[in-house]
Image (cartoon, rainbow, N blue to C red):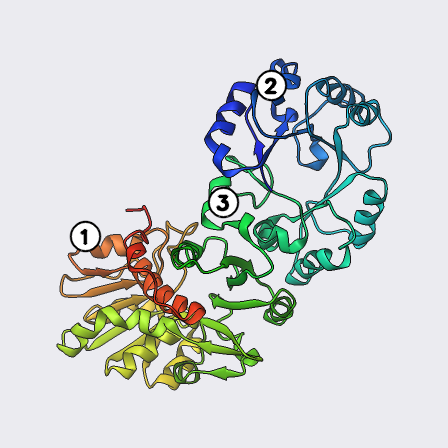
């Protein structure tokens, strides 16, 4: 089930949120701690205003809520609201037997016993779930994984506690995000969504239902994803998931915030992940775990696509072709013969090799001179310090491969003193925002612009082919654009 957390301060606002999201959800949670005090007396009437089951919740501040009164007054408020036809009431697992609990049992309202941990995960999470379930209540564990290893523990819940039929298990924050989408693989009976997030990692009900189709995941669903750190900003789910739907492929594509590649591959084996896109900073870190690699990966030393092939992982690099494709005509016509590449990380490796393989003279500039030197030696390119960028204002092509300028760093420019001229092509690999500060300056100078979003889409379509064996649906290609200027 997909549960909409209502975050309005009045009953009217909550009814409006409900109507907006009705087609995407299976039940709703009324958070009376978020209501104005004047509206709380109307809460008991709310279940009769909607046509879905309602969870009644009054969350105290220590559990991420807004209720500031005493425990006695909170209990009394819950008890009075239970005059209404609620399907469930959420009561924290450390609250002792109360009048609200007795009234809920009397009225046949199912009790959810919840535990919220915003700093980590209890070491005895399996025991806590079992103990609550043994009393006949529905256990809820909302915890905050601090690593991929913690996330593995969450995904073990389904098999370790298969005997517990009804349970709610979710990870908050960046590491926990996949458990919200793959809630069925965690063994959770529901996942939470909200128009306005009231807990770390919540997304909208529309996104959960239409982009991820999380409620359709079953035992045959192929799991794909993107691994990185950070990664939740990635546009890749908006490429891959509509593509899967477009060819009726039973698959889901999820972002995984990864601190340890080794731990991720343990998780991948455990939940049978079929393939992943790889982004910063793991494009080189994945190499030791690959049983087979393509010629480009071997040459570049960087991999952005990993696919399960029989009993091993195969690595390819679609960045290489996604990057160079729009430059080929200009390179063949000799309009682009020299290039300045900003950065020396994983993305830069693909860029420099692609340009060198097509005969371009390349200079790599980077703040860390040793990294620039090492990449230059591998690729037979030149290198220099980022501080000397203005020495190369004569080049035909400028390629920006770093994260400088990307949201939330959008006010910065990696080469603020560089003067562009209209004969140049400027290629920005950052795609959020579409026009970075550097690219906006290049536009003012009349340069030809190439955008990171277009490269992302080109390489994403190639990844789609690696994942599915099918071409990306042509009818969907025109929808793959960010609504940004």
For the N terminus, give its image quadrant.
top right
**Of the residues under marks 1 and 3, which one precedes in the sequence?**
3
Look at the numbered discs 1 and 3 and tell me whether their residues touch, using CB distance below 8 Å. no
- The image position of residue 159, as x and y in percent, is 73, 59
Which is in the foreground here, disc 1 or disc 3? 3
Q: Please, is residue 44 above or below residue 226 in the view?
A: above
Q: Which residue is mark 1?
A: 444
Numbered circles on residues, count: 3
Look at the numbered discs 3 and 2 and tell me whether their residues touch, using CB distance below 8 Å. no
In front: 448, or 159?
159
Q: Which residue is mark 2?
A: 36
In front: 404, or 250?
250
Give the SS element for disc 2: loop
Give the SS element for disc 1: helix
Which residue is pictured at 73% across the width and 52% down the height?
121
Disc number at residue 243? none
Q: Which residue is mark 3?
A: 209
Q: Categorize mark 1 by other alpha carbons within 10 Å: few (<14), some (14-19), many (20+).
A: few
Q: Please, is residue 315 above or below residue 245 in the view?
A: below
Q: Please, is residue 135 above or below residue 348 in the view?
A: above
**Of the residues under marks 3 and 2, which one precedes in the sequence?**
2
Marks 1 and 2, how far apart in space? 50 Å
Q: Please, is residue 65 above or below residue 76 in the view?
A: below
Look at the numbered discs 1 and 2 and tell me whether their residues touch, using CB distance below 8 Å. no
Q: Categorize mark 3 by other alpha carbons within 10 Å: few (<14), some (14-19), many (20+).
A: some
């Amino acid at each position: 089930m997909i549960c909409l957390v209502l975050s309005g301060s009045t009953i009217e606002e909550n009814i409006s949120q409900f109507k907006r999201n009705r087609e995407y959800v299976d039940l709703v949670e009324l958070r009376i701690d978020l209501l104005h005090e004047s509206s709380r007396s109307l809460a008991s009437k709310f279940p009769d205003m909607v046509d879905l089951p309602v969870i009644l919740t009054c969350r105290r501040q220590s559990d991420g809520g807004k209720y500031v009164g005493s425990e006695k007054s909170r209990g009394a408020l819950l008890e009075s609201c239970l005059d209404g036809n609620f399907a469930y009431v959420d009561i924290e697992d450390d609250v002792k037997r109360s009048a609200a609990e007795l009234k809920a049992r009397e009225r046949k309202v199912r009790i959810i016993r919840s535990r919220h941990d915003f700093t980590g995960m209890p070491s005895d999470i399996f025991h806590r779930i079992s103990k609550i379930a043994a009393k006949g209540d529905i256990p809820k564990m909302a915890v905050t994984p601090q690593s991929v290893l913690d996330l593995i523990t969450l995904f073990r819940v389904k098999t370790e506690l298969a005997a517990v039929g009804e349970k709610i298990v979710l990870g908050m924050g960046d590491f926990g995000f996949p458990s919200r989408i793959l809630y069925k693989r965690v063994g959770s009976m529901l996942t939470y969504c909200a128009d306005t997030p009231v807990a770390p990692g919540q997304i909208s009900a529309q996104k959960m239902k239409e982009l991820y189709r999380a409620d359709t995941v079953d035992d045959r669903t192929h799991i794909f994803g993107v691994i990185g750190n950070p990664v939740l900003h990635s546009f890749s789910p908006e490429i891959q998931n509509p593509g899967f739907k477009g060819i009726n492929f039973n698959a889901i594509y999820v972002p995984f915030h990864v601190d340890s590649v080794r731990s991720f591959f343990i998780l991948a084996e455990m939940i049978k992940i079929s393939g992943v896109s790889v982004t910063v900073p793991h494009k080189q870190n994945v190499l030791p775990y690959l049983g087979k690699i393509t010629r480009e990966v071997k040459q570049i030393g960087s991999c952005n696509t990993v696919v399960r092939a029989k009993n091993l992982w195969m690595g390819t690099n679609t960045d290489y072709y996604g990057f160079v494709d729009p430059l080929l005509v200009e390179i063949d016509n000799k309009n682009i013969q020299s290039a300045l590449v900003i950065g020396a990380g994983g993305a830069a490796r693909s860029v420099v090799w692609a340009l060198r393989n097509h005969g371009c003279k390349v200079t790599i500039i980077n703040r860390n001179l040793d990294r620039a030197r090492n990449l230059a030696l591998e690729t037979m390119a030149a290198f220099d310090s980022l501080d000397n960028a203005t020495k190369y204002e004569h080049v035909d092509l400028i390629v920006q491969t770093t994260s400088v300028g990307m949201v939330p760093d959008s006010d910065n420019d990696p080469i603020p003193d560089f003067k562009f001229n209209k004969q140049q092509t400027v290629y920005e690999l950052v795609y959020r925002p579409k026009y970075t500060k550097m690219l906006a300056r290049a536009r003012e100078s009349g340069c030809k612009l190439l955008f990171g979003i277009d490269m992302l889409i080109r390489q994403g379509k190639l990844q789609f082919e690696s994942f599915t064996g099918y071409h990306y649906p042509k009818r969907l290609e025109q929808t793959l654009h960010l609504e940004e200027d």
